[in-house]
Amino acid sequence: MRSQSYKLKDTEAEYTKLPVVLTVAGSDSSGGAGIEADLKTFSAFGVYGMTCITALTAQNTTGVKTFDRTSQKLVSEILKADIDDMFGYEGAPLKVIKTGMLTREAIEELANLNLELKMIVDPVMISTSGSELLGIEGVKLCMDKLVERAYLLTPNFLEAKTLYKIKVEGGGGGGGGGEEEEEEEEEGEVHVANSDEFKKFVLKLQKLLGCKNLLVKGGHIPFEDEEDNAKGKKVVDILYESEEDVLTTFESRYIESENTHGTGCTLASAIAANVAKDKSLVESVAIAIDYVHRGMRNMSKLGFGNGPLNHTVHPKSNIDDVVKTSEGVEMVHFHNGYTVFDYLKSHPNVKDNWQRYVQHPFVKAVAQKELAFDKFFHYLKQDYHYLIIYAQMHGLLASKATTYQQAHAQATIIGEIVTEIEKHKEKLKAYNVDYDIDEVKPGQACVKYCKYLLNMGQKEDFLGIKIALAPCLHGYAEAGAYGQALRRENPRDSKHSHVFQNWLNDYTSDWYLNSDKEGKAQLDELTAGGISKERMESLVKIFNDVVLLEINFWDEVLQV
Amino acid sequence: MRSQSYKLKDTEAEYTKLPVVLTVAGSDSSGGAGIEADLKTFSAFGVYGMTCITALTAQNTTGVKTFDRTSQKLVSEILKADIDDMFGYEGAPLKVIKTGMLTREAIEELANLNLELKMIVDPVMISTSGSELLGIEGVKLCMDKLVERAYLLTPNFLEAKTLYKIKVEGGGGGGGGGEEEEEEEEEGEVHVANSDEFKKFVLKLQKLLGCKNLLVKGGHIPFEDEEDNAKGKKVVDILYESEEDVLTTFESRYIESENTHGTGCTLASAIAANVAKDKSLVESVAIAIDYVHRGMRNMSKLGFGNGPLNHTVHPKSNIDDVVKTSEGVEMVHFHNGYTVFDYLKSHPNVKDNWQRYVQHPFVKAVAQKELAFDKFFHYLKQDYHYLIIYAQMHGLLASKATTYQQAHAQATIIGEIVTEIEKHKEKLKAYNVDYDIDEVKPGQACVKYCKYLLNMGQKEDFLGIKIALAPCLHGYAEAGAYGQALRRENPRDSKHSHVFQNWLNDYTSDWYLNSDKEGKAQLDELTAGGISKERMESLVKIFNDVVLLEINFWDEVLQV
């Protein structure tokens, strides 16, 4: 017998908080739809998924073979177990319920809940399994019990027609919609031949249903694309937010694909995941559509029927990444010397923090030469570690650059950071530091800051990462200037005066001010066309997070 | 009413092939264990999951409240639907079945299957739900019907003790194991106080059970760490592969954590996912242990009881990334001028491809000045696009560098690539190329190659990415030399002689040969300690894949 052994690396504790979504739907054994699709989608978006399975289906890509309903008693106990543990207390993580294929039993139980949760209702009725399970009476029950209290309803066009018909006729009609398209016009009949008619229909339907927000998906009725006929048909999905009275159209290329199994479930659960992450509904829908499209196109066909999509594609994290052009969207513009950086640092959420940062007691202590040298030494060690991550982040930027000139610019910055690191090392050598700085472990504040940056590096696009790096680059220039001003007011000296002075001089030097200017110019270039209000909010959040991390970094130095 | 519209970006088709795993287990409504944990794990590893749900539980982190078994008829129909669609034909994707909490009904149906699939059996019996569901008679049924034909059995120590007891006593004993630890010694009683006793126990148990491979998890019996006492206890997991007669020990730090709900399910499904991805069993186990550990430590507590782990942590993709030290492992070493690059290009799987690449008809045509200029022009345009990705990849390397000097070296290479790009542009300008090269779309071979690199960039570590970039850097040096030699043998001229000669000169210039040498030196440094045989195989695959992509790149040029 041969023996071998591996010692595994230790892992560090991080305590990531995941938002939680509960899906109430059927199980699709083939894994492409139902709670299986929901869980895969939640995972893709970094959301924790719980389940309440309303029915088990024996199913594959060619169809549903058979199914068993879950008893009302078990549905009730499952909902109770899930909700008792995750909802209803301070800091409880469950934020959103997403429903898919429902049974009467599940509808009754959901209606009894009456919780302050956002409920996203995907009224599954067209799929073979759905119509068998629920039938038209079930759909009516769902409308009576759930639709009005839903945060969002997400029918496809065929389902929307059925809902409309039921409301207008006050009943009747089949469970499906596909077979009815050819029928004679009559009361409750819907004809939609273009985007404008579609918009009108969505508005009418929302009024009839009384749901807060309504998204009607147009995948079943692609329109000709007048502007760009060569590219084929376009799909229009329409969202109406009744409280804000805003109608948003999402237009995308029609995809000819066999990978359509579970696209509806996946779209609704992708929206639910993003809503749970506190994204706006508009942004959530845009990101969800993009995720479904990429999942469909990024998959080799599985199975003999309509194959599933690829839930493992990496989703985009913000609306700007998925949008080609937008019209009528509120934008933030920067001009006449009012830059995106000015916007960020003077934003109401950021302003005070920015002042606390660039006029931090650490800077004051340096300027007044009152800082204990061991604290400054501690700071230099922390900063040394930080700069290595800061260099890595610019490598990441180079890898996300869309032109080689942009990549080159980031590579050049890495060179400059290396100069800064070498300067730090020289400073320490001059003080006969007798141990190797590479061996020193970074403190909590530094680790937290670095992890935040690395996380942004994974999630964000080029602009997002640039914004995350901006407080450091530009804040140090302001802090340096603040320190020099204090120094001029009150020129004192102490034992280590020159090292403190040296530090202030570095960050007010032409070399540094040039980098500062260059960095701002890059931000201006990236935002020259303006930024949607939606996206700007998330950028403000990143900027503010990092300002707080900078404050924390210097706080820790003073507390050593 | 305000109206706004978004046009979404188009997405490109990619046709990713996902391996498929079927999990046969219970549903845990709280989402931390059962098929929910399995699906989350499969997604994390990029594997497509199917399900056969054996029972529905109403469960949360404080325990199982109630459950319903799935009828044998439905289990049978589900397995049939799943397998009919995904197994048993040429290229069928279903490769692995993973079982968790089983019922008698499910065991009977699984035993009837008798398929050529790898079955990974996690003998769940200790959890509250498991013992109720299966009982000791059920465990015996599982042993009789499934264990011998299992590819891998993954009991924890308590489960292993129960299995042992049943085999030795030929019956008796309770369903659980936890309560028995205090009992008097008797036949079938197991006492394991250290690694050596644990190893002996695992070997004995495998012989009794007759399963092909056995992994016994030691999380319930952490040992004192003699070598490194300050760091706390260590956990030992032991794998015995009977056919190879190899015993592998995985030693890791014991984690004090409340996030233990579903760790067993998750480990087994992480192993299943990696086996489905054709990883070796040893590598699969190491990666799975690391994934579970990081999931446990990377989670804020959820719920009131034993919380779930974070399934959304990014798993590592190879054994070297998760291992600190190894002993008795077969290594590949490079010395006496025999470099890792020599190993790669002369590997039996690579050798012929490497020759086809560096002596490609494209190079011959360039050297003989027989290449049509428009083909060469097409090549330059393709190469221009490729170089931009090549620069981005070095940005990614900089972002993964462990020292700032290493990051700086990658940044410097970006500078050199930019020089190369500018040279290409100059070459084209000299020919009065009248359209902007930035507007030209890359061809299929180029796109395929670039996507492969970007994918490796996401999945691989520093060394893996370096290996993916090696065929280009070093192959061009060899191709250049080959071209020059041909040229000397047969010096012909044609209309565009000097542009061809120029190209050959570039890749045989001191400038290029220096980069070539520098790149090989970096590879040698990265592999100075040797590489495990296991890891080397995956590096060979990457290297060979890229060599084929290089051949394809030039093939396409000649076919234009």
Image: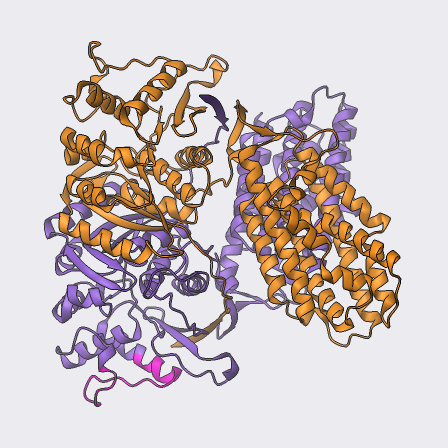
Chain colours: A orange, B purple
Q: Can residue A441 be seen in this view?
A: yes
* Quadrant occupied by the N terminus of chain A: bottom left
Give the number of marks: 0
Left or right: where A52 falls relative to B386: left
Query: Residue B208 in the image: x percent, y percent?
Result: 22, 76
Q: Is residue B552 visible?
A: no
- Quadrant in the rendering for residue B355: top right
Between A159 and B386, which is closer to the camera in this rendering? A159
Query: Residue B89 in the image: x percent, y percent?
Result: 27, 42
* Quadrant occupied by the C terminus of chain A: bottom right
Between B476 and B113, which is closer to the camera in this rendering? B113
Between B244 and B199, which is closer to the camera in this rendering? B199
Left or right: where A314 falls relative to B406: left
In the displayed structure, B205 sits above or below A175; it is below
* Chain part drawn in magenta: B180-201
- Outermost residue to the front: A489
In the displayed structure, B181 sits above or below A329; it is below
- Quadrant in the rendering for residue A378: bottom right
Rendered residue at 55%/48% (across/down): A458
Query: Residue B405 in the image: x percent, y percent?
Result: 72, 59
Rendered residue at 31%/78% (across/down): B203
The answer to whether residue B29 is magenta is no
Query: Residue B380 in the image: x percent, y percent?
Result: 68, 31
Rendered residue at 15%/47% (across/down): A70
Between A308 and B413, which is closer to the camera in this rendering? A308
In the displayed structure, A321 sits above or below A239; it is below
The answer to whether residue B184 is magenta is yes
> What predominant SS class does the magenta segment belong to?
loop
